[in-house]
Amino acid sequence: MKSLKILFFLISFAYSFSAIGQTVYKTKTGEKYHKESCNYLKYSKFAITLEDALAYGYEACKVCKPLYKTSKTALSSSNAKADNNNTESKVSTASQCTGKTKTGKRCKRMTKNANGRCYQH
């Protein structure tokens, strides 16, 4: 019985250690992290560790359902989100694209990107 408890402890420890070092993927402009096989990664895909993704405030994709947060990383991600609340309000407001069209006029699309340009510019 004691050896079974030790085996269970080692398996759970190995699982939690691999969860922290797991590689997940993010898009160029998205706010979620994904599995490598997710459909949302069709046009852009950047590898990042799960720990870094949670530290930057990314959330798990609801479509591909990557590995959920462990208790240790959940605390660090909630702290990171609390720190990012001040800057998040700047990013969440949409502004007019700063790009120019072929005719030389300013683009009329709205964007939330930090660089001030829509998806076409």
Image: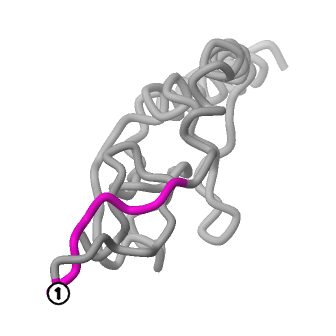
Location of residue 54 in the rendering, given as x and y in whole percent from the top left corner: 55, 30
Give the residues drawn in magenta, as a range: 95-103
Q: Quadrant of residue 48?
A: top left
Residue 34 sits above or below residue 120 on the image: above
* Relative side of 71 to 30, left or right: right
Q: Residue at x 48, y 26 (%)?
A: 51
Q: Secondary structure at mark 1?
A: loop
Q: Quadrant of residue 108?
A: bottom left
Q: How many labels, in total?
A: 1
What color scheme is it?
one colour
Location of residue 57 in the rendering, given as x and y in whole percent from the top left corner: 58, 31
Looking at the rendering, in which quadrant would you find the N terminus? Answer: top right
Nearest the eye: 54 or 17? 54
Location of residue 55 in the rendering, given as x and y in whole percent from the top left corner: 52, 22
Indicate whether residue 96 is drawn in magenta: yes
- Residue located beneath label 1 in the image: 103
Q: The disc labelled 1 sits on which kind of residue?
A: Thr
For disc 1, the neighbor class at 10 Å (few under 14, some 14 to 19, many from 20) is few
Indicate whether residue 47 is drawn in magenta: no
Residue 102 sits above or below residue 78 on the image: below
Q: Quadrant of residue 99?
A: bottom left
Q: Residue at x 17, y 87 (%)?
A: 103
**Secondary structure mostly taken by the magenta-highlighted segment of the chain:** loop
